Image (tube, rainbow, N blue to C red):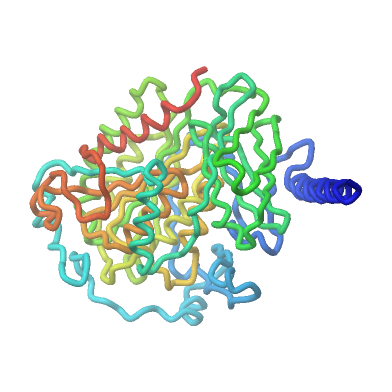
């Protein structure tokens, strides 16, 4: 009896000490009264960019503001230190005052490749220039899969394609976080920090339905058994413990907060603007007016802001060019109309740097905004440039409540599909892919077939599918 008493006492003391440690660490991040969030920077917390900040813009009532990022603004990856698991996960940022000459001296540019409109889809097939294919074939059709809803299929897809070059984040173990208030209404855009006693932590925000997925092994190489999860919105805050293997879902209830009178939507198009993308860019130009008109006419009548980030590659006319969020739809249409496809050559493009720009340098609004990125690309990112990496920024996107909807254009290879699906799944988005009458021939025109590793999908025109995804997201918002 005495030994049993001692064991129980020790267990209780251990749990109390761990809880106290986690609470102390969380309080160091969110002291009372709660100011604007200060994001962690302890040695093990290298999974967020050092300039990561919560979305906080109060409006998007601005004209077109354009920013260009040159490849010379990227600094080389620092040498590996410490834990080998962290070797390729040291955060990068755009340094102030970095010169193109200094960058080129530190990181030699790759050998020049001939510029062409064609894109190598795999070792056996070359896609013909699109000017001869679907541009004159009418509407663009697309299918869509939800890798979070069909998670077992997604894990099987990952297992089949592990050999393609990518940045690994382990998502096999996951927990669904659901945040509501004490009156039973969902709480969208709640800030959440997940923290282990060893210092590993990650940030996320709930979606329009008050939900988010937690993937412990994606940010914690120590595989802690217990995490403290702290959620807040406004002045309401709650802390609970998540113990691995105990439950597959975690429910949190906050005190009711202030409701936003009108739905706010920040919608950004992230577009590969290399030569092989001419058709998709032309379609985006022609359909944007109908997309914005249909989104504006949705039952929630959202307060809409639009942004554009276009990218090419080293040696092209521009590397990354971004246009900040604006509510001036006509001015935004003018910017999109001026975008032309060009450059490219080798298959990978500057997607990493463009995603970093979209996540960290646009003025995303705070205060319960729904935030979405529509990525349209037919090639994977360069993983060899040594600057920002997509896995770091997909995690930062989840921390900012940005869902990535990845659109795989014609010619997207297995590596590109794997990476686009990684980003969409982790942020709670969808993987979208163009479809044709003959899957292996984009010249065959719109249809239901695809070369991608997907099943059980429906097909719509691309513009209708984008509007549908926006509508479904906004429909999750609690009614006032």
Left or right: 69 in relation to 153: right
Q: Residue placed farthest to the right in the image?
A: 2
- Residue 149 placement: quadrant: top left
Q: Position of residue 203 (x, y in %)?
A: 60, 48
Q: Is residue 307 among the parts visible in the rendering?
A: no
* Front-most of residues 479 and 371: 479
**What is the residue that sits farthest to the front in this orientation?**
1
Residue at 19% in and 48% down: 435
Position of residue 61 in the picture relative to residue 228 (left or right): left
Residue 339 at x, y percent in the picture: 28, 51
Q: Is residue 84 above or below residue 401?
A: below
Residue 208 visible in image: yes
- 39 and 64: which one is in front? 39
- Relative to 62, say whether 444 is above or below: below
Q: Position of residue 153 (x, y in %)?
A: 35, 50
x, y percent for residue 306: 40, 39
Residue drawn 50% across the image and 58% down it: 170
Q: Nearer the viewer, residue 375 or 169?
A: 169
How many numbered tags mark residues here?
Answer: 0
Quarter of the rendering containing residue 200: bottom right
Residue at x-position 24% and y-position 56%: 277
Q: Nearer the viewer, residue 388 or 442?
A: 442
């Amino acid at each position: 009896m005495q030994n049993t008493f001692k064991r129980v006492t020790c267990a209780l003391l251990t749990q109390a000490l761990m809880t106290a440690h986690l609470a102390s660490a969380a309080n160091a991040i969110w002291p009372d009264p709660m100011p604007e969030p200060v994001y962690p920077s302890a040695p093990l917390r290298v999974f967020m960019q050092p300039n990561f900040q919560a979305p906080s813009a109060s409006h998007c009532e601005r004209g077109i503001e354009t920013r260009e990022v040159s490849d010379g603004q990227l600094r080389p990856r620092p040498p590996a230190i410490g834990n080998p698991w962290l070797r390729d996960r040291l955060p990068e940022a755009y340094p102030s005052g970095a010169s193109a000459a200094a960058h080129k001296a530190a990181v030699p540019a790759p050998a020049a490749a001939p510029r062409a409109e064609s894109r190598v889809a795999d070792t056996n097939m070359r896609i013909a220039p699109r000017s001869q294919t679907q541009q004159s074939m009418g509407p663009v059709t697309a299918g869509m899969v939800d890798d979070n809803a069909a998670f077992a299929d997604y894990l099987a897809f990952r297992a089949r394609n592990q050999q393609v070059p990518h940045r690994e984040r382990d998502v096999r173990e996951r927990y669904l976080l659901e945040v509501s208030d004490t009156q039973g209404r969902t709480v969208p855009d709640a800030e959440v920090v997940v923290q282990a006693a060893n210092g590993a932590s990650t940030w996320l925000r709930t979606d329009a339905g008050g939900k988010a997925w937690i993937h412990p092994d994606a940010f914690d190489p120590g595989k802690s058994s217990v995490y403290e999860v702290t959620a807040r919105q406004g002045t309401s805050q709650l802390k609970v413990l998540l113990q691995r293997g105990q439950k597959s879902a975690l429910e949190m209830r906050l005190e009711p907060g202030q409701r936003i009178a009108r739905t706010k939507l920040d919608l950004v198009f992230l577009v590969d603007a290399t030569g092989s993308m001419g058709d998709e860019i032309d379609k985006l130009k022609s359909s944007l007016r109908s997309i914005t008109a249909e989104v504006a006419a949705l039952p929630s009548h959202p307060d809409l802001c639009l942004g554009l980030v276009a990218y090419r590659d080293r040696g092209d006319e521009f590397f990354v060019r971004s246009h900040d969020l604006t509510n001036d739809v006509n001015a935004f249409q003018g910017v999109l109309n001026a975008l032309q496809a060009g450059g490219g050559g080798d298959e990978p493009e500057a997607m990493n740097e463009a995603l970093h720009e979209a996540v960290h340098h646009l003025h995303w609004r705070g205060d319960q905004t729904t935030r979405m990125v529509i990525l349209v690309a037919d090639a994977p990112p360069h993983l060899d440039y040594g600057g920002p990496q997509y896995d770091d920024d997909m995690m930062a996107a989840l921390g900012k409540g940005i869902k990535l909807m990845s659109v795989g254009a014609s010619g997207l290879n297995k590596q590109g599909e794997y990476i686009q699906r990684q980003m969409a799944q982790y942020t709670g988005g969808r993987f979208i892919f163009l479809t044709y009458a003959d899957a292996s021939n984009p010249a065959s025109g719109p249809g239901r077939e695809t070369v991608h590793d997907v099943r059980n999908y429906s097909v719509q025109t691309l513009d209708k599918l984008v509007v549908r995804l926006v509508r479904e997201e906004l429909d999750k918002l609690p009614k006032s």
